[in-house]
């Protein structure tokens, strides 16, 4: 009896500390070591990378949040209500833009807003291991994420309650059998090495005004499968489909197209490409709820985990514009 009791206590303790020990998985530590080395700053340390999240830890959280839209929704209703923020149920924004692409916030504003919110969550829920996860996913380049790393390294205490995801968003081409013609599809990448990203220094404004062939071929004309394979060949990086309902025509073929896409995406997975945005705003108001639900179900049926975000472009990380 005593033994059973001791074993039970042991299991409870292990389950309790698991979220805390998970971050120290060797692969994520190695990622942080690589970030420190690639940064070129001899004063940067792995210890001060504590707020930067690696792919194993992020994958673990995404799986945990799969059936929890409240973690990703700040609940911006059409009347502007933000119940998810008021009630402190909101936990993660895995897609946001800064002044390094078409966003209005600087990386510093982004981190500061996330940290302020995280501190509030932490004061109300002292045992919450992940008060707020925030990603910067500018279009094509990773300059904003490099700036964010610098801020975290210089002031780790200020950002101790957040987890920062180094990401980017790209545009690729998708052409499923049920589509008349190929379409632009956005994909998110998380937990990459921003110092070695191919378009790390790309000037978004200049590039979008005058797309050079070097960019155009890779970011617009490349097939999404090639892009996924490219990420899978990297040592670090997860890949997700961004706002899947935004780029397909709402005609009778949409269910088929989504189904084909998720099916194929899943077959490419190898553990790195098993994510799609399922909880995102404000597109859910542009789309009918039934379609939204069907897409979400289709993801689930294919073993693709749903994530979410505000796809921030404006002055608040909790809103889209
Ligand atoms: Zn997008
Ligand atoms: Zn976006």
Image: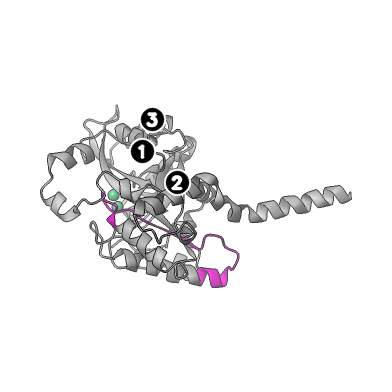
Instruction: Sort mark 2 into few (<14), some (14-19) or many (20+) by Cα contacts within 10 Å.
Output: many
Instruction: Give the alpha-carbon distance from disc 3 to disc 2, as whole Å.
Output: 16 Å
Residue in the image at 47% along x and 67% along y: 118
Instruction: Give the alpha-carbon distance from disc 1 to disc 2, as whole Å.
Output: 19 Å
* Residue at the front extreme, as displayed: 42
Residue 269, quarter of picture: top left
Q: Which residue is mark 1?
A: 231
Q: Return the x and y of residue 68 as percentages of the image width and height.
A: 51, 53
Residue in the image at 18% along x and 53% along y: 203
Taking the magenta stretch, the answer to whether it contains residue 140 is yes
Q: Is residue 26 visible?
A: yes
Residue 164, quarter of picture: bottom left
Residue in the image at 29% along x and 68% along y: 315
Q: Return the x and y of residue 77 as percentages of the image width and height.
A: 38, 63
Q: Return the x and y of residue 5 as percentages of the image width and height.
A: 83, 52
In depth, the one of 268 and 38 nearer the eye is: 38
- Looking at marks 1 and 2 on the same chain, the residue that comes earlier in the sequence is marked by 1
- Mark 1 and mark 3 in contact? Answer it, CB < 8 Å: no
Q: Is residue 66 visible?
A: no
In depth, the one of 297 and 26 nearer the eye is: 26
Q: Which residue is mark 3?
A: 264
Instruction: Give the alpha-carbon distance from disc 1 to disc 3, as whole Å.
Output: 16 Å
Residue 117, quarter of picture: bottom left
- Mark 1 and mark 2 in contact? Answer it, CB < 8 Å: no
Taking the magenta stretch, the answer to whether it contains residue 76 is no
Q: Which residue is mark 2?
A: 306
Q: Which mark is residue 291?
A: none
Residue in the image at 56% along x and 60% along y: 129
Cβ at disc 3 under 8 Å from ligand 1: no
Instruction: Sort mark 3 into few (<14), some (14-19) or many (20+) by Cα contacts within 10 Å.
Output: some
């Amino acid at each position: 009896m005593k033994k059973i009791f001791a074993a039970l206590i042991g299991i409870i303790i292990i389950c309790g500390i698991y979220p805390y020990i998970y971050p120290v998985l060797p692969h994520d530590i190695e990622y942080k070591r690589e970030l420190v080395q690639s940064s070129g700053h001899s004063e940067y340390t792995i210890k001060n990378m504590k707020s930067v999240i690696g792919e194993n830890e992020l994958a673990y959280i995404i799986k945990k949040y799969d059936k929890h839209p409240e973690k990703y929704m700040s609940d911006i209703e059409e009347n502007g209500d933000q119940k998810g923020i008021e009630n402190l149920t909101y936990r993660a924004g895995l897609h946001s833009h800064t002044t390094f692409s078409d966003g209005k916030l600087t990386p510093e504003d982004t981190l500061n807003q996330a940290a302020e919110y995280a501190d509030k969550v932490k004061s109300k829920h002292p045992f919450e291991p992940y008060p707020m996860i925030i990603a910067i996913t500018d279009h094509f380049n990773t300059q904003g994420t490099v700036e964010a790393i610098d801020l975290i390294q210089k002031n780790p205490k200020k950002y101790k309650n957040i987890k920062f995801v180094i990401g980017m968003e790209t545009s690729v081409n998708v052409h499923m059998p049920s589509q008349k013609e190929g379409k632009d599809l956005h994909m998110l990448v998380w937990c990459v090495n921003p110092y070695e990203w191919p378009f790390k220094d790309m000037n978004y404004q200049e590039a979008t005004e005058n797309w050079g062939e070097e960019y155009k071929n890779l970011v617009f004309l490349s097939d999404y499968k090639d892009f996924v394979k490219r990420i899978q060949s990297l040592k670090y990086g997860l890949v997700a489909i961004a706002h899947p309902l935004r780029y397909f025509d709402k005609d009778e073929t949409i269910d088929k197209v989504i189904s084909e896409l998720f099916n194929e995406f899943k077959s490419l997975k190898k553990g790195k490409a098993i994510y799609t945005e399922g909880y995102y705003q404000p597109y859910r108001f542009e789309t009918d709820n039934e379609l939204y639900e069907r897409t979400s179900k289709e993801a689930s049926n294919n073993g693709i985990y749903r994530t979410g975000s505000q796809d921030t472009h404006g002055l608040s990380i909790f809103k889209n514009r």
